Image: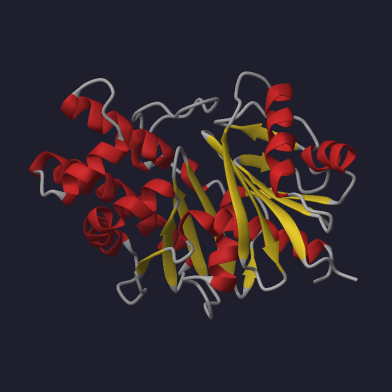
Amino acid sequence: MTPKRVIAVDLGGTKIATGSVDADGALHERHEVPTPTESQDALLDGIEAAIRPVAGEEMGAVGIGIPSVLDRATGKTLGSVNIPLEDVSLGEVLRERLGVPVVVGNDGNVAALAEWKLGAGRGADDLVMLTLGTGVGGGVVLDGSLYRGIAELGHVVVVADGPPCQGNCTGRGHLEAVASGTAADLAAEKLWGEGANAELLVGRAQEGDAAALEALSGIGHLLGAAIGSFVNTFAPELVVIGGGFGNAAFEFLVGSAHEIARRETVVPELPVRIVRAELGSDAGLIGAGLLALEALGA
């Protein structure tokens, strides 16, 4: 008998979100704690501690989305940019601690799964999902199936020899370096000094501040360059923009992003449809829950 609910975990660079998801994909009992990044052991303890408040008696499985490259054959993390998680079979470790099946997926992939099944991508056979948060995650649906391999869309090069990427990534000019919430933090600091951040930047833009609007338009310009490449590669019916920063700043990014993406497409007839994620910051959790439900055959 399938449990009524499973536990979902969305592991980010700044916070761990947990909740329970029912068989219809509805999210319940959302809980958030800061992500402990001082060591891998501290992170594992933090994940377990974050699960406990939402784990009821009917916890049948756990699904978790992580900002990491995963080896599909072994389940091990091959590398992580914003968290100390490398060369570990997270599913096995947590299964031993929690005593239930644990399914792990890339955070961009699970967010794409949620938006495709229950959000802005319902009914689409081909879509690209970008999550703009601390970093930039991505997921792809092709021919009606979620692509579960490495789809590090946030690490496509947008600016050759551009700004250094963050965390453990040694690249430069990646989409994550120029169009994430972290990039928006840096843009805000350039305008208003230390302590300014993406939240202030978006807030000022909402008030009509010209400098804030210009900064966000510039970020949208670079986002559009990447989207143009994704359209040329995947020909998606739509591109879904989510994540904390992506959702908050969408209206200030989409204009310039669409303009540049449209300009960069190799075939003028290819559609460029950029939409805001419907599930907001819950997409990662809901997608992780769907992974767990899949594992149980629900």
Q: Is residue 86 visible?
A: no
| Residue at 25% in and 61% down | 263
Where residue 228 appears, as percent x and y from the top left, is: 36, 58
Q: Quadrant of the C terminus?
A: bottom right
Say if 225 sits above or below 83 in the image: below
- Classify residue 107 as left or right of residue 90: left
Q: Quadrant of the N terminus?
A: bottom right
- Viewer-closest of 184 and 154: 184
Say if 245 sits above or below 232 in the image: above
Where residue 52 appears, as percent x and y from the top left, is: 74, 42
- Classify residue 228 as left or right of residue 123: left
| Residue at 75% in and 63% down | 5
| Residue at 17% in and 29% down | 191
Where residue 51 appears, as percent x and y from the top left, is: 71, 43
- Viewer-closest of 225 and 136: 136
Where residue 279 appears, as percent x and y from the top left, is: 49, 63
Say if 143 sits above or below 218 in the image: below
Q: Is residue 209 visible?
A: yes
- Classify residue 214 as left or right of residue 229: left
- Viewer-closest of 192 and 255: 192
Q: Residue furthest bottom?
A: 123
